[in-house]
Image: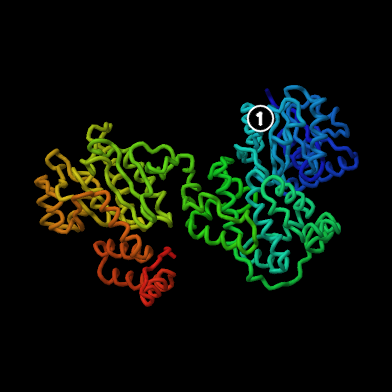
């Protein structure tokens, strides 16, 4: 079915904005409202909006007139919808009004017409009960002003057909917008659902007399936001805010019914901008905000952690992917970042601590930590990995789909283990290198990981590169070498402690991977070496350089030129291996890693790792300069304070990497 004619029901701010948007893209538009006066005001607003494009020189007068003439107005639903391909309702957010509109649409619209609602909060499934054939019904939530704002949420009701969702998705893309699919029908969808807890938070700030509206708004502006929360509520309409809260109280939690200050303001008719008075007096479309000192009773973290918490809940419910949530919040709230980006800089424990504090202070269950945060799985949630959780007795994959030749698991608090999984020799090919590259990037800024263990599945670490791989020419083989060098270099630079757990064969590229790690532990019987020269090659992933630095030129010459293998015991004797574990290499390595993760301050360890590696690359005076700079940086960390405090108190330190 082709969409050529669109009917918009409701000529208010959202309705006439949506009509303008479709008309600008060449659609024939029917704009419907019960009042002729409202329709005339809508056309005037559309002219004024288009006139701005004319003034900027991006549209001609003739084009503007052509767009306006493409919009026909109607005061009766039956006349406006009978020939429409797509019908979008944009009437006030009152259930009884919307139900009446949809029942009338169902009587007069074509049986194959797609029907959408621009509701910002009400569940689509709930609205669909008033529509004949609900498989053609969905949510099409534009943001204000529709002509400017990029985001459109496409919401699937329980009965919405897949073909309908995809069709409308493509239509919205054709308007130059960014559609985001809401996969599960929940109150508030994505953006408004994520904003709901902070709206409640600011309501309760007033209810408890913690700060005044202007003090909070001044704080918000001091943080670079264009508008504070109370000015924004005034702009939207306090009646709209209150209606949303009442709906959320019914659908989500009774906590949302605690918003007493706004309730009383609505009862008095103080609705914000539309009434000329709300939290502020309004004149010429602008709030009159007196001077105030920004409050210190509210922190940016309070707001951001509530957004992160609600985003995690949506992920747990399967409402949307982390990427779609990030996109929706950025575009829907016109911000440079969303809650997923914010969560990247948090640990589960930090988020949980702040949320527990807020829920206790305000006695709000809605502020309590989401299950994933409570269980220490914030990173899994924002990484889109919750659906892949395995039974507790099995290792849990920590990476997104698409990983075939490595496995990654969280084996203990602060410790991740990467295993090469190409039985039985764990030969390294381009797939392994690429997946290892992605894993390093994934863990680089993971503040819940202090130590990474790298090993091989089965009885071998890795017997080297897979030489059966086809390469078209020497250039391709050279790039394969360069790729491995770059990835192994990343291991030396990642701000984590990387331990290679060696067993069985540790040869060629496998040996080079081990040498790129910070610490090597091994069984006594493991076999290490570089057979490359005996095959007509040289170590091509950094082996010639790293072995020379770690074991000395003479030892490196002998091992590389002869291809002779040495045991783990031999490697320990010459200092290549730090520990020998013969009984249970995996268990002993984990125990060793636990000791490091609990006793070494992560920022200090990352700095020390960088300094040690630079010692082999820069002159001594440069290295000493870097060392003193590191001391200055570390002096301001919370970990240093914790280290000194724990020493004086004779207790074990608890480092947070801050």
Taking the spot 73% from the left edge, 32% from the top edge, the residue there is: 128
Q: Is residue 147 visible?
A: no
Outermost residue to the front: 393
Above or below: residue 540 compared with residue 344: above
The image quadrant where one finds the N terminus is top right
Question: What's the colour scheme?
Answer: rainbow
Q: Position of residue 638 (x, y in %)?
A: 44, 70
Q: Position of residue 91 (x, y in %)?
A: 80, 40
Above or below: residue 164 compared with residue 407: above
Q: Nearer the viewer, residue 56 or 88?
A: 88
Q: Which residue is mark 1?
A: 160
For residue 22, which quarter of the picture? Answer: top right
Q: Is residue 42 visible?
A: yes
Q: Nearer the viewer, residue 52 or 493?
A: 493
Residue 379 shown left or right of residue 243 in the figure: left
Outermost residue to the bottom: 648
Residue 267 shown left or right of residue 364 in the figure: right
The image quadrant where one finds the C terminus is bottom left
Numbered label tally: 1
Taking the spot 16% from the left edge, 45% from the top edge, the residue there is: 530
Q: Position of residue 368 (x, y in %)?
A: 58, 55
Taking the spot 18% from the left edge, 50% from the top edge, the residue there is: 582
Q: Position of residue 87 (x, y in %)?
A: 75, 31
């Amino acid at each position: 079915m082709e969409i050529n004619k669109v009917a918009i029901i409701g000529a208010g701010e959202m309705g006439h904005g949506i009509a303008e948007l479709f008309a600008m893209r060449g659609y024939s538009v029917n704009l419907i409202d019960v009042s002729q006066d409202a329709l005339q005001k809508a056309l005037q607003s559309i002219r004024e909006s288009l006139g701005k494009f004319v003034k900027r020189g991006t549209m001609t007068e003739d084009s503007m007139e052509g767009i306006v003439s493409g919009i026909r107005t109607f005061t009766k639903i039956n006349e406006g919808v009978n020939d429409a391909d797509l019908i979008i309702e944009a009437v006030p957010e009152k259930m009884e009004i919307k139900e009446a509109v949809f029942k009338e649409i169902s009587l007069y619209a074509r049986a194959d017409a797609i029907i959408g609602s621009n509701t910002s909060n009400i569940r689509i499934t709930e609205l669909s009960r008033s529509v004949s054939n609900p498989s053609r019904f969905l949510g099409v939530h534009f943001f204000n002003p529709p002509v400017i704002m990029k985001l459109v949420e496409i919401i699937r009701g329980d009965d919405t057909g897949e073909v309908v969702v995809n069709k409308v998705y493509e239509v919205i893309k054709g308007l130059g917008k960014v559609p985001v699919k809401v996969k599960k029908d929940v109150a508030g969808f994505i953006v408004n659902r994520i904003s709901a807890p902070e709206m409640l938070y600011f309501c309760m700030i007033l209810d408890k007399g913690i700060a005044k509206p202007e003090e909070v708004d001044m704080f918000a502006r001091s943080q670079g936001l264009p508008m504070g929360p109370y000015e924004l509520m005034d702009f939207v309409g306090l009646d709209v805010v209150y209606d949303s809260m009442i709906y959320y109280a019914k659908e989500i939690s009774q906590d949302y019914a605690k918003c007493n200050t706004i309730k009383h303001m609505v009862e008095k008719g103080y609705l914000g901008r539309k009434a000329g008075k709300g939290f502020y007096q309004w004149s010429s479309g602008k709030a009159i905000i007196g001077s105030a000192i920004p409050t210190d009773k509210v922190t940016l973290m309070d707001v951001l952690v509530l957004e992160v918490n609600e985003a995690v809940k949506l992920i747990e419910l399967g409402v949307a992917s982390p990427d779609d949530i990030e996109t929706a919040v950025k575009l829907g709230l016109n911000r440079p970042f969303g809650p997923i980006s914010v969560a990247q800089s948090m640990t589960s424990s930090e988020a949980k601590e702040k949320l527990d504090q807020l829920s206790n202070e305000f006695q709000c269950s809605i502020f309590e930590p989401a299950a994933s945060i409570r269980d220490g799985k914030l990173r899994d949630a924002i990484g889109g990995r919750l659906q892949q959780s395995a039974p507790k007795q099995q290792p849990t994959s920590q990476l997104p789909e698409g990983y075939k030749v490595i496995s990654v698991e969280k084996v203990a608090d602060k410790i991740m283990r990467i295993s090469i999984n190409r039985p039985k020799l764990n030969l390294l090919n381009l797939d392994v290198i690429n997946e290892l590259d992605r894993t390093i990037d994934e863990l680089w800024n993971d503040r819940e990981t202090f130590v990474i263990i790298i090993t091989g599945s089965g009885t071998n670490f890795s017997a080297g590169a897979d030489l059966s791989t086809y390469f078209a020419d020497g250039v391709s083989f050279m790039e394969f070498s360069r790729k491995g060098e770059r990835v192994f270099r990343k291991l030396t630079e990642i701000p984590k402690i990387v331990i290679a757990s060696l067993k069985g064969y540790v040869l060629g590229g496998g040996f080079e991977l081990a040498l790129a790690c910070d610490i090597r532990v091994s069984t006594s019987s493991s076999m290490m070496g570089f057979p490359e020269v005996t095959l007509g090659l040289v170590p091509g992933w950094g082996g010639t350089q790293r072995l020379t630095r770690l074991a000395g030129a003479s030892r490196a010459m002998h091992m590389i030129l002869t291809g002779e293998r040495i045991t783990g015991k031999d490697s320990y004797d010459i200092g290549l291996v730090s520990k020998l574990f013969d009984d249970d290499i995996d268990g002993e390595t984990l125990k060793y890693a636990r000791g490091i993760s609990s006793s070494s301050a992560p920022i200090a360890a990352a700095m020390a790792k960088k300094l040690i590696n630079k010692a082999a690359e820069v002159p001594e005076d440069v290295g000493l300069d870097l060392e003193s700079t590191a001391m200055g940086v570390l002096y301001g960390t919370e970990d240093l304070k914790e280290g000194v405090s724990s020493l004086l108190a004779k207790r074990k330190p608890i480092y947070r990497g801050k």
